[in-house]
Image (tube, rainbow, N blue to C red):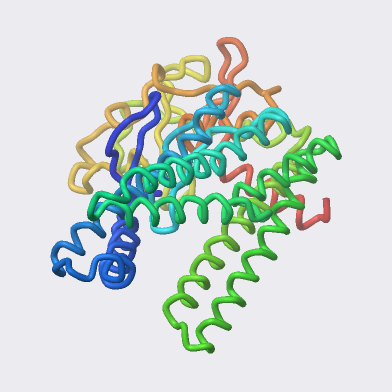
Amino acid sequence: MDGSMKIGTVWGIPIRLHGSWFIIFFLVSWSLASGYLPQQYPQLSVPALWLLGALTSLLFAVSVVLHELGHSYFALRERVPVRSVTLFIFGGVAHIGKEPSSAGAELRIAIAGPLTSLFLAGFFSLLWLLDRPFPYLAAPSEWLARINFTLAMFNLIPGFPLDGGRVLRAVIWRLSNDPFKATRWASVSGQFVAFGFIGWGIFSIFSGNFFNGLWLIFIGWFLQNAAASTYAQTSMQHALRGVRVSQVMNHNAPLISPDMLVGDLIEQRVLNGGQRAFLVTGCGREDLCGVVTLREMGALPQNRWYTTQVGDVMVPYERLVFVGPDTPLLDALQKMDDADVAQMPVVQGNMVLGILTRDQILRYLRVRAEIGV
């Protein structure tokens, strides 16, 4: 979700708005102002219809955020961290920091979103009953009731990553006691659902409903990508079960001095040697000063390469995230994700043993695939 901006915080969770959300905000506002609302209020002027449509569209966005906060609330109750909630073109997404620890937790987190939308559908239905005598309030309330009900039903479709797919995953997990098997089946189900949406969209286009058909194709494409990505991630996690950091780490991590010039490092070790991450040491392997990677070097303007030392751009020791050699590799990956880093020094006591990078994990997986493991 690069390119999103923070618009608030709830329960310590950043609420973010992706640039693509403005597309769906405009389309919903346009649909309401040119189709639904003129039928309900033919006496309204065009500017008034657009204003009412925009306000209704904003309330729909609030409903989507509340749907995702429903997931987030139960995730926090299950001690599952929530990094952010983001609104984007296809709705909203709660970025959960790790997988739930049990099938029951997965079920409670998954079903919370649709239940929240059903509650909102009931709330707006009650509001519609109360505000029917008031001009210009009844139609938006009715539409919001219907759209929240539709949102709940759509999300209950049993295809990952929809909430219904997560419910399916929880059920299979409970029956099989195997979260990896459950995720694979839910992901496959999600891909079938996605291709169904794409097929429905193509049929709609040839039936003369071009806009709706195109939108269904886009939704199917998004769901198929998400389901395929989840399937690939699950396969990777399955392959890494039982693997320790010591089996994958670089035991001969490149060591450099903090007073080395960044330009010399790039010329001698990056461009010529192809290395991407370095341990910065002052007096041997036991004296770790920090880590420098392509990220830190790339952030430095080129005209300062030969006047800046590595020690001035490295990630200092105090900010480093460490991992032990006997740590399960999946736990190390989770630690990398939580810290948003691509490498971690491997330590045992006060001794630095090497470095673990995402590139090494990918190479390990490629080698396993090539030899048929």
Instruction: Please state if 99 lies on the left or on the right of 340 as rendered.
Output: right
Q: Quadrant of residue 190?
A: bottom right
Looking at the image, which residue is at 46% across and 83% down? 209
Residue 318 in the image: state x and y as whole percent.
Answer: 39, 17
The residue nearer to you, when weighing 244 against 131, is 131
Q: Is residue 296 above or below residue 77?
A: below
* Residue that protrudes farthest toward the front in the picture: 133
Q: Is residue 340 above or below residue 235?
A: above
Residue 340 in the image: state x and y as whole percent.
Answer: 45, 35
Residue 180 in the image: state x and y as whole percent.
Answer: 76, 42
The residue nearer to you, when weighing 371 against 274, is 371
* Residue that protrudes farthest toward the top in the picture: 349
Instruction: Please state if 105 lies on the left or on the right of 39 as rendered.
Output: right
Looking at the image, which residue is at 56% across and 44% down? 114
Q: Quadrant of residue 102?
A: top right
Residue 258 in the image: state x and y as whole percent.
Answer: 35, 26
Disc tally is 0
The residue nearer to you, when weighing 122 against 25, is 122
Instruction: Please state if 3 lies on the left or on the right of 322 as rendered.
Output: left
Q: Is residue 48 above or below residue 155?
A: below
The residue nearer to you, when weighing 25 against 32, is 32
Looking at the image, which residue is at 80% across and 45% down? 181
